[in-house]
Structure formats: structure tokens, C-alpha cells
């Protein structure tokens, strides 16, 4: 039987010129983590240390260990699952081979050999520059030479990531000893044929003895089949009657079947291969219709609106990502209502741990091949490496039912057409042959059970612009780069594969990453941890369309930027979901970060959830209520992605911001399963002027459906005795443009424009925190925080932050903040099902969903000074509103770096109450709770 021995002990690291002493090394790992552990370099995630360790990526490094002589088998192989990137491997001074691809595994015959094992890594820069010198210059979105070698592109930096060019044995290494034969590869084709689960295993073997008769035996779901091996190949087909189907989360269960294949010689086992599979079908409907060309995933015959997020490597040093960390991060995605994760093309083919977690959680996986934002040469040595890595990884990932789509590249087809590449290339190769030739051929040959698309964005052919929103996938970056997020309502793409808005990470993340720094938007560390071109300028311009910029007040800046991010993403998703089935998916850029940084992520580099994360829980719930303008009518779009009808009564209230109810009505509604229903708002309930707004609450029968966070235990129960308990709240969609004129039934116009960050001038904000005062009775603070008061007293703040009172006291705040709003736009927001965190509104009863609509720009809205009571109990902070309280947020990490809140932004009507669950806060304190509460304020 094949025996595998991990090689994890006794490794050392040294630099070839002797400038770094010999150090102990961890394998798997990388040079940076070993140098960090030895104290040779500072933590590159802190301050501006990234620049101090840039030299590491430009050096050559060697890993060494001793390899003893191993006998007892006919052959011994040295197997590397991953080498980063350009290396030569020597044993006892003898060259075993050379490597130049981070995305492949390598195997070397070391039978009868022993001695000093050395893995010598050449600087990735040196190799890339040599290939560039041989093949010629190719354009890219960034100056670093990442397109000239097969390595994780974002290790060279990105507009959200540091430049930390790694080297090392980044995946496991082992010795494999075997006799007679071993299993070289198993290619599983898993399908469903008329209710029968079918597993066809195509087996390749490597022989030490050519003449030995071999058989393979496979088992799955209680079925067992044996077949002979002809030469070096064999095929086993198993059928599982009445196989249970694997479904995406929210559509059904995720049953997984153990598959085992054993290689035998005369009945004696030689090697075994084990995996888990799931039975499901997947199609990609790209049919032409009256609206253009669709892009709809179909799983087990069910058409899906994909509720997605983009995934980048969760650490710039991928070897540090554990199975538990994958499970935590992907679990957060699932709890946010996500059902699709796109693995972006500037990263890696992830480890088995990633796909295992997705299989179990019901998260669909869209896998990019690793090409991003550059023209890639198609000549040798790269061409052979591309095909070899594609063949290996396609087969490696085939068992996973979560994997539903192969994608050729990120933005390269778009870049060729729009970013000036075509003229600069002057006929040189740039990757088209990979995306339209090599990769689809490999997928068709090896994995015909899954669809392939040439790129994202991609319209399906050169007959249409690559980023045409009416055809295929679309990346919407013009809005972030140049426009207000209300412009998302100007078009209805068929599938939005990227869009997003920036915000800073959690306060505790910044405090850890920038120790000792007086935080300001333009402080040195903040600027270093903002990698986007003109990122702060775009943040400021985006904020000033809705709020007064809080000069000199970092805390307010931090809060408002996070509010603006949540509102921007809500603007897009609410609009696009309301246009199902024309639009068949949104994939938010991005779920996660690889270090502490201001970025588009919903979860920051320390794993803390931004308000956007909680907003996704509302936006991606099965049931969403949103106020839309259809032509000249105001309508409520009831979006029902659940498997049961949603029918009930809509309670509409036309209200004043002072709390007065001007008019109300109840309307029956029904949205069938997987549909959207529009309900026209009666004219007498349409709010008029800056002082009025609309509240719409929907209950309903037919089951609650998949509320975000349902069953996760993350949401706390009501903990107060008075007031109306509500679920959650969030950012409001605000805009200066009407709905796309095509509505749901006509073609969206073609789009072009720059990718994520195009622009020039930088606008900066600055400021420092102003302290809050406190007295036994009433605290009055002239600064930006709410007044702090003790016990049953009252807090009054004259700055920009809403006050919060302790105990049963009342918090009042008045200050300089402009309400949200843009131009002549309207504000839309919707609440969430009970128990789900997020939403501009708040569910007023179990199963309820809310939408809010403000017809005027927020600067014109005469918001009252927010007043609310605060109660603190172990594990909970309860806020009861006395006035309208908009976008209330508890920044739990200000209570304790380990603390987490179970919801984000919440809007409360007078008399309503929200209980925010707080974990990791060992010593609840009313004053601390007040100081961590933020909300919007009236304009001065």
C-alpha cells in the first residue's frame, strides 16, 4: 500500500549571499512568515512596514532539510503540492528539476537517494523581468510584472492589497513510497440521469511493474463496482438509485456521498483515492431574448438569481489560511445570505478546505482561472505552463458539487477593447488564445459537466462590447469611479459580476494596524493603507453627494463612510433584484480583505464585519421589499426568491419626520415563488415634500423563507418590556436618476469605461476626535461625540454624533451632519425579516419586511434631533426610539476589540425598539455603550 510521509520537520531557510543568518523554517509556509517569526522583519501589516520589507521579494532564498534513505518499496517520490514559484530542487547536490508555476504540483523520483534536500527559489521579479525581456512588454493595470509568470498576481499588490512578493514551499511536501503501481489521477464525472446519480471515474495509473495485472474497485452510496485496468487507464461507472440532490443553500439540502476507489493487484490494495461528491445538474442559460443575451445559472432545473460575493485570498500569505479560517469566513458569507462565491482571477486555485466548506454550506463556486487585468503572453514558457496548470486543477476540483462555473479571466477581454491595449500590443499575443482556445478546450475535454465562460465581463462574442450590460456578465465600475451610486438605477445588466463601494475597516482594526497614530483620513498610516488610485478623493466625492463632509472629525468620517458603503451597495442590489429575471445575479466586490485596509470589503482584514456585511443579510434574504419608480408611478416591489408564495397585507404609512402619521392604508399582495410583484402606491400615500416619508411593512404567509442569518443563533431576542421590537436597519438607496427607462422588458445600453480606479486628483479630509463631557445629571459636549451622562441622567451633544443616555435615560444629539440624499434623487430602503441584521427599515413582527422611502435629498429633510433610551444587559444593548432615529449603529469593537454586534445599521420609528446582541464584551457598561452608538443627525 502506498505510504505517505509528510516532510514538515527540520527545515531551515537561508539567503544565498549570506546576509541573513540560517533560520528555522515552517513548511508549508513562505519566506516572509519565517523572517517575521524570527524577528528579522517587522509585521508588514502594521503602519508602513510594507515598504521596509520590500527587499525580501527581490532576493533569492533556499530551503533545506535532510532526507534519509528510505527502503521497502519499489519507488519513492518526492511530492510538492505547491512551490512559489521559480525554483530548482536538488538532492545531495543532484538536480531533480526546475519549477516555474505556483499553481501546479510537482513529483520527483528519488528512489534510492538520500542526503541534503535543497529548494532554491529565484526572485519572482528576476524571472518575470527575464521573461519580459524575451517576449516583450505587455500592458497591464498595474506597473508590477505579474503577467510574466504563473504566480498569484495580487502578491505584487493591488488596489486593495500590499506588495509582498512571496517565495516558499507554500503547500505540503511529502515522500510517497509505493510498489507495483499507484493511482496517478482520478477524473470523476458526476451527473444525474432520470433521478439516478451517476459517478464515472476515469483512472490513470503509474506503474513500477508493467506486466502486473491491475483492477480498480469503487464504492459510493452502498454501490460497489470493479473493473480492470488496461495498460495505465481504467473506467468505473457507478449508479446510485434515488440519489438525493445537492442544492445551493436556501433551495434544499446538501447531501454528500463518500466515494472510494482502490487500486488492486491480485486482490491486494496498492493505493486508494477518497473524495466526497454531490449529485446535481448545472447549466448556464445564455439564450438570446428581447433584452439581449442572458446569463442565468440553472441548478437541478431551478433558475437562480445568484446572490454573490467576490473572494480574494484571505491573506496575502496564503499558507497561513487554515481550514478553520476558511470555514469561519465562508460561514460568514452563508450567514449573510450569500449563495455564490466567485474566486477572483488575481488570486489562486484555493485549497481543498475552501471547496469542502462550500460543499457543506451550499455555496456555489465560480472559479476564475488565474488571469487578471493584464495582457498575458501566449508564447513559451508560459503557454505550456498555462495548459498544465489548467489540466491539473480542473481535475483536482471536479469532485466538488459546489463548483458550478469555470471562467477564463478577470477583465482582460474588456481591457483589450477599452484600456488602450490593442494599439500598444500591435499584434502581439495577449491571452485571447487562452480564453477562447486553450481553456475552453481543456474544460470541454476533462469536465464537460460544467459550463465555461471566456471572461468576466464578457458579452459572449466580439459582436458586442465585452462589458455590454445587455449581454452576459457586466462589471459596473463607472459609478464608483466617477458618479453617484444612484446611477446604478440607470441600467439593468443581465448579470452584475462586479460592483462595489469603499469604506474603512473597523475602528479596532485600524487601531491595531496603525499603533500610536492619531487617526485622520489623511494621516500617514491611513493613506498607506488606502491602495486605490485617488481612493480618498472618490470616498470624499461620494460622501459629499449625500452628507456634509465632517472636517476634523475622524470618528464621524469613519461612521459616515461605512454608512455610505452600505447605502451604495443597497442601491444596486435592490434595483437589480427588482428586475429579476432580466437581471439574474449580483456579485458584490468584495467579501473579504487580505490585510487591514480601506477597501470594498464587507469583512475587514481582521475578520470584523462592516455595516455592509449586515446590510447584505437584508439585501440577500429570500424576501425583499423595495420602493421603486416605474415610469411615473411609485411602486413597492415585493421580491420573493423563496420556494413558497409570499402573500399577505402591505401596511403603508405616510409619515412626517416628526412622527406624525398623515395617512395609512392596507393593500393585499401576492408574489409567487421566485418572482417579483409590483404594488402601486396609492396617490394619497405618496409623500410630498422634504418632511414626509413612506413606511411599508409586509407580513405574509407561506413560510418565512430564507431570512438572512436564519438558524445561525446570531440574533438576540427582544429584551425590553415596552416599545415595538424591530429587527434591523441599514443604508438607504439614494439617487439622482430615475429607474432605467427600459424597465424589465427592454434592452440595456452598451457600457464601457474604466475599471475600478481611474481618476486623478485626490481630495483629503482630516480631523481628530473631540472628547465628550460627563456629569452626574446632564452631560454637554461641544465636540463630535454624544454627551455622556451617568445613571438616569440625560446626555446632550452639540457636535455631530447622536447622544445616548444611560440606563433609562434619554440620549439627544444635534450637530452638523447633513442627512443622506443626492441631487434631486429619492431615497429607498427596506427592512428585513425578523431576526436578520440589516435594513433601512425594521421588521415589526416575525416574518415582516420593511421598506422606507424619502422623496427629498437628505440635506433638505428636517430630521428631528434623535432621542432614544438605552438599556444594557449581559450580551445585549437595547435602544428604544423617542423620535425618528436613522442609521443607528453600535460599533461593538469600540467596547472591546473582541466584541461583535449581531447587526449593523437600523432605523427606528418613534416608539420602536431594537435589541442588539453583543458577544465578547465581558463587562457591560452603559457609558461605554453610549459612546459606541452612532446615528444620523439633522443638518445645521
Image (tube, rainbow, N blue to C red):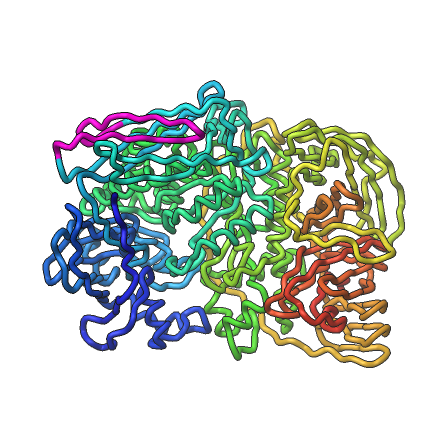
- Name the residue at the left extreme: 94
- Name the residue at the top extreme: 194
Residue closest to the eye, 506 or 216: 216
The spot of residue 570 in percent (x, y) is: 63, 47
Position of 288 with respect to 802 (left or right) is left
For the N terminus, which image quadrant?
top left
Residue closest to the eye, 304 or 686: 304
Residue at x 61% of width, y 42% of height: 620
Instruction: Look at the image and tell me whether residue 466 can be seen.
Output: no
Q: Tell me how many marks there are.
A: 0
The spot of residue 369 in percent (x, y) is: 35, 43
The spot of residue 476 in percent (x, y) is: 51, 44
Residue closest to the eye, 261 or 836: 261
Position of 232 with respect to 659 (left or right) is left
Residue at x 39% of width, y 70% of height: 50
Position of 72 with respect to 699 (left or right) is left
Taking the magenta stretch, the answer to whether it contains residue 715 is no
Residue interval drawn in magenta: 210-234
Taking the magenta stretch, the answer to whether it contains residue 226 is yes
Instruction: Look at the image and tell me whether residue 635 can be seen.
Output: yes
Q: Quadrant of residue 632?
A: top right
For the C terminus, which image quadrant?
bottom right
Residue at x 29% of width, y 66% of height: 57
The spot of residue 569 in percent (x, y) is: 59, 49
Q: Is residue 794 above or below residue 710?
A: below
Amino acid at each position: 500500500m502506498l505510504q505517505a510521509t509528510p516532510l514538515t520537520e527540520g527545515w531551515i531557510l537561508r539567503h544565498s549571499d549570506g546576509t541573513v543568518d540560517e533560520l528555522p523554517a515552517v513548511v508549508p509556509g513562505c519566506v516572509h512568515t519565517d523572517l517575521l517569526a524570527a524577528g528579522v522583519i517587522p509585521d508588514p501589516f502594521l503602519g508602513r512596514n510594507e515598504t521596509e520589507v520590500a527587499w525580501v521579494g527581490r532576493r533569492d532564498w533556499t530551503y533545506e532539510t535532510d532526507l534519509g534513505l528510505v527502503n521497502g518499496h519499489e519507488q519513492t517520490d518526492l511530492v510538492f503540492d505547491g512551490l512559489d514559484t521559480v525554483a530548482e530542487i536538488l538532492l545531495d547536490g543532484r538536480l531533480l528539476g526546475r519549477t516555474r508555476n505556483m499553481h501546479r504540483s510537482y513529483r520527483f523520483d528519488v528512489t534510492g537517494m538520500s542526503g541534503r534536500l535543497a529548494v532554491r527559489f529565484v526572485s519572482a521579479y528576476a524571472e518575470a523581468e527575464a521573461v519580459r525581456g524575451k517576449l516583450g512588454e505587455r500592458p497591464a493595470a498595474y506597473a508590477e510584472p505579474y503577467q510574466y509568470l504563473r504566480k498569484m498576481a495580487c502578491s505584487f499588490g493591488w488596489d486593495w492589497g500590499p506588495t509582498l512578493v512571496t517565495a516558499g514551499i507554500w503547500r505540503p511536501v511529502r515522500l510517497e513510497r509505493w510498489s507495483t503501481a499507484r493511482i496517478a489521477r482520478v477524473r470523476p464525472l458526476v451527473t444525474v440521469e432520470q433521478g439516478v446519480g451517476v459517478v464515472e471515474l476515469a483512472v490513470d495509473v503509474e506503474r513500477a511493474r508493467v506486466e502486473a495485472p491491475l483492477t480498480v474497485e469503487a464504492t459510493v452510496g452502498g454501490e460497489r463496482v470493479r473493473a480492470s485496468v488496461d495498460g495505465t487507464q481504467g473506467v468505473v461507472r457507478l449508479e446510485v438509485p434515488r440519489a438525493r440532490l445537492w442544492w445551493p443553500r436556501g433551495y434544499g439540502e446538501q447531501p454528500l456521498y463518500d466515494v472510494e476507489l482502490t487500486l488492486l493487484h491480485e486482490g491486494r490494495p496498492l493505493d486508494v483515492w477518497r473524495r466526497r461528491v454531490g449529485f446535481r445538474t448545472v447549466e448556464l442559460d445564455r439564450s438570446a431574448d428581447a433584452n439581449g443575451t442572458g446569463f442565468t445559472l440553472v441548478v437541478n432545473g431551478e433558475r437562480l438569481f445568484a446572490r454573490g460575493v467576490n473572494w480574494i485570498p484571505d491573506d496575502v500569505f496564503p499558507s497561513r489560511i487554515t481550514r478553520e479560517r476558511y470555514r469561519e469566513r465562508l460561514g460568514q458569507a452563508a450567514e449573510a445570505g450569500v449563495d455564490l462565491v466567485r474566486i477572483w482571477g488575481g488570486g489562486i486555485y484555493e485549497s481543498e478546505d475552501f471547496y469542502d466548506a462550500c460543499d457543506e454550506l451550499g455555496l456555489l463556486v465560480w472559479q476564475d482561472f488565474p488571469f487578471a487585468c493584464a495582457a498575458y503572453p501566449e508564447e513559451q514558457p508560459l503557454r505550456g505552463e498555462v495548459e498544465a496548470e489548467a489540466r491539473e486543477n480542473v481535475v483536482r476540483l471536479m469532485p466538488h458539487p459546489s463548483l458550478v462555473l469555470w471562467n477564463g479571466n478577470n477583465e482582460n477581454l474588456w481591457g483589450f477593447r477599452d484600456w488602450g491595449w490593442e494599439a500598444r500590443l500591435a499584434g502581439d499575443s495577449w491571452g485571447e488564445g487562452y480564453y477562447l482556445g486553450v481553456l475552453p478546450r481543456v474544460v470541454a475535454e476533462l469536465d464537460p459537466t460544467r459550463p465555461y465562460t471566456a471572461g468576466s465581463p464578457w458579452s459572449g462574442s466580439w459582436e458586442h462590447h465585452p462589458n455590454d450590460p445587455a449581454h452576459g456578465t457586466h462589471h459596473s465600475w463607472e459609478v464608483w469611479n466617477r458618479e453617484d451610486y444612484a446611477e446604478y438605477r440607470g441600467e439593468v445588466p443581465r448579470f452584475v459580476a462586479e460592483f462595489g463601494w469603499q469604506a474603512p475597516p473597523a475602528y479596532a482594526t485600524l487601531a491595531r494596524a496603525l499603533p500610536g497614530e492619531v487617526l485622520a483620513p489623511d494621516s500617514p498610516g491611513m493613506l498607506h493603507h488606502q491602495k486605490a488610485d485617488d481612493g480618498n478623493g472618490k470616498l470624499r466625492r461620494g460622501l459629499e453627494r449625500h452628507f456634509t463632509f465632517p472636517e476634523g472629525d475622524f470618528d464621524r468620517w469613519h461612521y459616515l463612510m461605512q454608512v455610505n458603503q452600505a447605502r451604495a451597495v443597497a442601491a444596486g442590489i435592490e434595483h437589480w433584484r427588482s428586475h429579476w429575471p432580466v437581471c439574474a445575479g449580483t456579485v458584490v466586490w468584495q467579501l473579504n480583505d487580505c490585510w487591514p485596509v480601506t477597501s470594498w470589503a464587507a469583512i475587514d482584514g481582521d475578520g470584523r464585519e462592516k455595516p455592509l456585511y449586515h446590510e447584505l443579510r437584508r439585501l440577500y434574504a429570500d424576501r425583499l421589499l423595495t420602493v421603486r419608480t416605474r415610469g411615473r408611478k411609485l411602486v413597492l416591489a415585493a421580491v420573493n426568491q423563496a420556494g413558497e408564495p409570499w402573500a399577505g397585507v402591505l401596511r403603508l404609512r405616510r409619515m412626517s419626520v416628526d412622527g406624525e402619521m398623515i395617512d395609512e392604508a392596507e393593500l393585499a399582495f401576492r408574489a409567487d415563488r421566485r418572482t417579483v410583484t409590483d404594488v402601486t402606491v396609492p396617490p394619497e400615500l405618496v409623500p410630498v415634500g422634504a418632511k414626509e416619508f413612506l413606511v411599508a411593512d409586509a407580513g405574509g404567509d407561506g413560510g418565512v423563507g430564507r431570512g438572512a442569518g436564519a438558524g445561525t443563533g446570531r440574533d438576540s431576542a427582544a429584551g425590553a418590556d415596552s416599545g415595538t421590537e424591530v429587527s434591523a436597519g441599514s443604508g438607504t438607496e439614494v439617487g439622482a436618476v430615475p429607474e432605467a427607462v427600459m424597465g424589465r422588458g427592454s434592452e440595456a445600453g452598451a457600457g464601457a469605461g474604466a475599471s475600478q480606479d481611474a481618476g486623478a486628483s485626490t481630495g483629503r479630509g482630516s480631523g481628530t476626535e473631540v472628547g465628550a463631557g460627563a456629569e452626574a445629571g446632564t452631560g454637554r459636549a461641544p465636540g463630535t461625540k454624544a454627551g455622556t451622562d451617568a445613571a438616569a441622567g440625560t446626555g446632550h451633544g452639540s457636535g455631530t454624533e447622536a447622544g445616548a443616555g444611560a440606563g433609562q435615560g434619554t440620549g439627544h444629539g444635534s450637530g452638523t451632519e447633513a442627512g443622506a440624499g443626492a441631487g434631486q434623487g429619492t431615497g429607498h430602503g427596506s427592512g428585513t425579516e425578523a431576526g436578520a441584521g440589516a435594513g433601512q427599515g425594521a421588521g415589526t413582527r416575525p416574518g415582516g419586511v420593511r421598506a422606507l422611502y424619502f422623496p427629498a435629498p437628505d440635506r433638505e429633510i428636517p430630521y428631528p434631533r434623535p432621542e432614544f433610551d438605552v438599556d444594557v444587559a449581559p450580551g445585549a444593548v437595547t435602544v428604544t426610539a423617542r423620535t425618528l432615529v436613522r442609521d443607528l449603529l453600535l460599533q461593538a469593537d469600540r467596547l472591546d476589540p473582541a466584541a461583535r454586534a449581531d447587526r449593523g445599521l437600523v432605523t427606528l420609528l418613534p416608539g420602536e425598539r431594537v435589541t442588539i446582541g453583543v458577544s465578547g464584551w465581558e463587562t457591560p457598561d452603559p457609558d461605554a455603550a453610549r459612546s459606541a452608538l452612532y446615528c444620523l443627525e439633522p443638518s445645521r
